[in-house]
Amino acid sequence: MLSGLITISRSKNGASRQVPMNAVVRSMLFDLSAQRRRPNDPDELIFDGAYRTVARLFSHAVRQAQTGLRGEGKDANRLEGNTWHSNRHSFASRLVMAGVDLRTVPELGGWKTLSMGLRYSHLAPSHLQAAVERLVPSNAAELARS
């Protein structure tokens, strides 16, 4: 918590890695850590469930959400096919749409190749415009007036 990093002891590819936390995640995890059985024990995990267990719980939560939406007469189809793993892709998509460069996305998402980050490039067509705008000198407006 103090380092501002989330340690993933065994990622999808079997390696350990760390991901920086933003302020919202850090605050939420801090609150959750206070609810542990031994809140003063820094070695007690906040989440100790196996991936398969978490994935099953997530699937159950999605089904409950769909049932609740349908009960309210709302469209539940947007949740169809949503899995725990989908969150990883949502993370990458949101990073790209927020303007994070395409080299950083696979690093944060835990992909070993740049090509995985490029899968999300279509979500940020403005990066092309931003790239060519970098060629314009900062004093271009002054030059145009003279």
Image: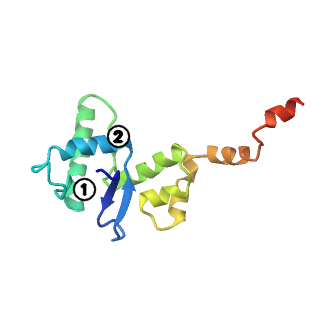
> In front: 118, or 69?
118
Please state the horizontal and vertical placement of residue 79, each as a whole percent of the image. 33, 43
Percent coordinates x, y for residue 62 in the rendering:
26, 45
Residue 7's x, y, as percent?
A: 31, 59
Mark 1: give few (<14), some (14-19) or many (20+) Cα within 10 Å.
some
Is residue 119 visible in the rendered image? The answer is no
Judge whether 17 appears above or below 30 on screen: below
| Residue 138 visible in image | yes
State which tag comes first along the sequence, 2 or 1: 2
Amino acid type of disc 1? Ala
State the SS at label 1.
Answer: helix
Q: Give the image location of residue 11, x and y in percent.
A: 33, 65
Comparing 3 with 105, the one in front is 3
Number of numbered discs overlaid on the protein picture: 2
Q: Residue at x 32, y 31 (%)?
A: 74
Is the C terminus in the top left, top right, bottom left or bottom right quadrant? top right
Q: Which color scheme does this rendered protein use? A: rainbow
**At numbered mark 2, what does the secondary structure look like: helix, strand or loop?**
helix
Please identify, in this view, whether the residue under mark 2 or under mark 1 is nearer the observer. Answer: 2
Q: Residue at x 18, y 59 (%)?
A: 43
- Give the vertical position of 106 relative to 136 (above or below): below
Distance Cα–Cα, label 2 vs label 1: 23 Å
Lateral position of residue 32 relative to residue 6, left or right? left
**Residue for badge 1:** 55
The residue at the point 27 percent across, 39 percent down is: 66
- Looking at the picture, tell me which residue is in the foreground, 130 or 51: 130
